[in-house]
Amino acid sequence: MAHVSKTPAGKFRANWRDPSGTQRAKTFPTKREAMAFLVQVEASKAKGNYVSPDGGRVLFSDHAGLWMAAWNTEKTTAARDGSVMRNHVLPQWGAWKLGGIDQMHAQQWITDISRVRSAATVFECHRLASAVMRSAIANRLVGVNPFAGLRLPPRRKRETEQVISRESLRRYLLPAVPDRFRALVAVAGGAGLRWGEAIGLCEDAVNLDKGQLSVVRTVIEVSGHTEFKPYPKSGAGRRVVPLPGWVVELLREHMAQHERGPAGLIFTNAAGGALRRTLFRARVWKRALVRAGLLGDLVQLGEMVEGTWADETGGVHSELFKRREQAIAYVAKHQGGGLRFHDLRHSYATWLVDDGVPVNMVQRVLGHERPETTLALYTRRTDDAERILRALTGGDQDDDEGDDSGAVLTPC
């Protein structure tokens, strides 16, 4: 039971037990102050908002470390959040005591980093800092979250996604992709698979006779290391996807010419292991875009090749090269923007919606939990309403030659 005792030094010690039953004590100059403090403690315990008197002295970095160590999340998420914490949050707040962080300083921090970081980065910094303080509140170290209610920069949706047409994919991009990776790009564009799902595709998940594949596993990459994850991104991610005929042909050809990796892995690097996203983007993907005429510009000038590119700020540059491959590599490295591998998934979803496929079916083959995600993030209706209407009424053929350019969707 809470009580006050006198110390040998003539002061008064308030004694009480916190909600966990641990004995606590705090010394005051007078008995009146000690009694008043105990009244507040007992009242806060009764109301359920007890806060440890010493909790505010804990350093932000110490509690953040405990909070991060207790994470129960995916490796990729933990790696991403850990990077934001180390590079942006802890340099600012690590040496601060939890009780010393106030809303004014927190808002000033948000304002300062908003001047030099993207709105998305600011949002992640705020999310993690606020999560640490919420954990401190839950553990009765502090009573308020100074990061709550801050004014954040608006997260305006940037038009970064690009949509490539079926015709451009098959006529220009696929021929520009090296043979070893052509079927991989075809699977992403013709089946809408995510990067990890595509490079994690194994022989047991493909049925070329039926023209379909099953998404049952994925490959994740953390700090340059890849590993299998025996399940996709979400429960809805486990699905069966029908394949267009041209994808079946490319997959069959690839599987006949290339050996499998571990667990029957279909798409491998030169060493037989899983592909790494950053290396693929730099050495294969962006160079293929340049060859296809979808990134930068190449012009043959006699025996020289002129490469032209635009940097991230929009500045245009050009240079002469002796060899075409040298020009391709240079332009691919320095040209800003461009079609992303994930944009093949955006494109696939857009083709299906434009073809009149019901949203619930598009949702199913994309592996989304909610149809809102399908419509809001991954589809881009075209302005060619007349073509769509003709297609829906059977009055028009697909842009590509033949009738197998689009997947026929059936319930999975």
Image: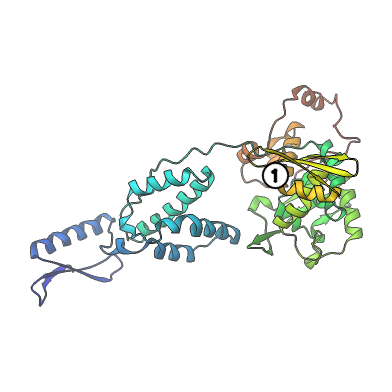
Instruction: Please provide percent x and percent y for residue 277.
Output: 71, 56
Identify the element where label 1 is drawn: helix
Q: Label 1: which residue?
A: 364
Q: Residue at point 42% right, 43% down?
A: 111
Point out the residue furthest to the bottom here: 8
Image coordinates of residue 18 in percent, x first then y, are 26, 66
Total marks in image? 1
Residue lying furthest top: 386
Viewer-proximal residue among 30 and 18: 30
Q: Judge by depth and name the residue closer to the eye, 386 or 185.
A: 185
Q: Residue at x 68, y 51 (%)?
A: 237
**Which is more toward the observer, 87 or 332?**
332
Is 110 positioned to the left or the right of 57 in the image? right
Q: Is residue 383 visible?
A: yes
Q: Amino acid at mark 1?
A: Arg
Indicate the quadrant where residue 196 lies. bottom right
